[in-house]
Image: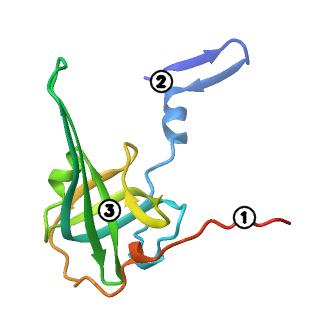
Amino acid sequence: MKISLFLFAFGVSLSVSDMAESKPGLRKPVFTKVDQLRPGTSGHTLTVKVVSTKMVMQKGRPDGPQPRQMRIAECLVGDETGMIIFTARNDQVDLMKEGSTVTLRNAKIDMFKGSMRLAVDKWGRVEVTEPASFTVKEDNNLSLIEYELVNVVE
């Protein structure tokens, strides 16, 4: 059975099957390595190991209708090309256990005091995956590189 939809204002007729066929499929993620990260970029998908986790802030608000906590942890993550600090927020903190391997989807680079930090906001995802076979290259920490904002006048 074919259902047709008629748009009176434009005089265009589309069937439901036509609309379903025009929807683009999901694209395969392109995995990025840590040493390819640059300031101001976003949309990265990485598989990294958690080297260390340090809780930075933990605020509780037990006075509301549901007790909400705000937690932020700085996690040193890396792959075989280098390391970077990942800022984990709220539920992400529980996933960032030392030694575990995680996939960061739609990650972005935030600048904090001139250095790069990796973060995943509400449009991204942090997933624990099976342990990776690589060893983290610890002598290339991208968060230790300080960047300076330079205004270029043409």
Spot occupied by residue 104 in the image (x, y as percentages of width and height): 32, 60
Secondary-structure class at tag 2: loop
Query: In the image, which disc is placed on residue 36?
Result: none
Secondary-structure class at tag 1: loop
Q: Give the spatial CA distance, label 1 vs label 2.
A: 59 Å
Spot occupied by residue 38 in the image (x, y as percentages of width and height): 52, 70
Q: Are marks 1 and 2 in contact (CB under 8 Å)?
A: no
Any part of residue 137 in sight: no
Query: In the image, which disc is placed on residue 151?
Result: 1
Residue occupying the point 60% across, 26% down: 14
Pointer 2 residue = 2
Amino acid type indicated by mark 3:
Phe
Q: Nearer the viewer, residue 147 or 18?
A: 147
CA neighbours of label 2 inside 10 A, class few (<14), some (14 to 19), many (20+): few
> Relative to 43, is 67 above or below?
above
Amino acid type indicated by mark 2:
Lys
Task: Report the quarter where the C terminus lies.
Answer: bottom right
Q: Is residue 58 left or right of residue 38?
A: left
Q: Give the spatial CA distance, label 1 vs label 3.
A: 28 Å
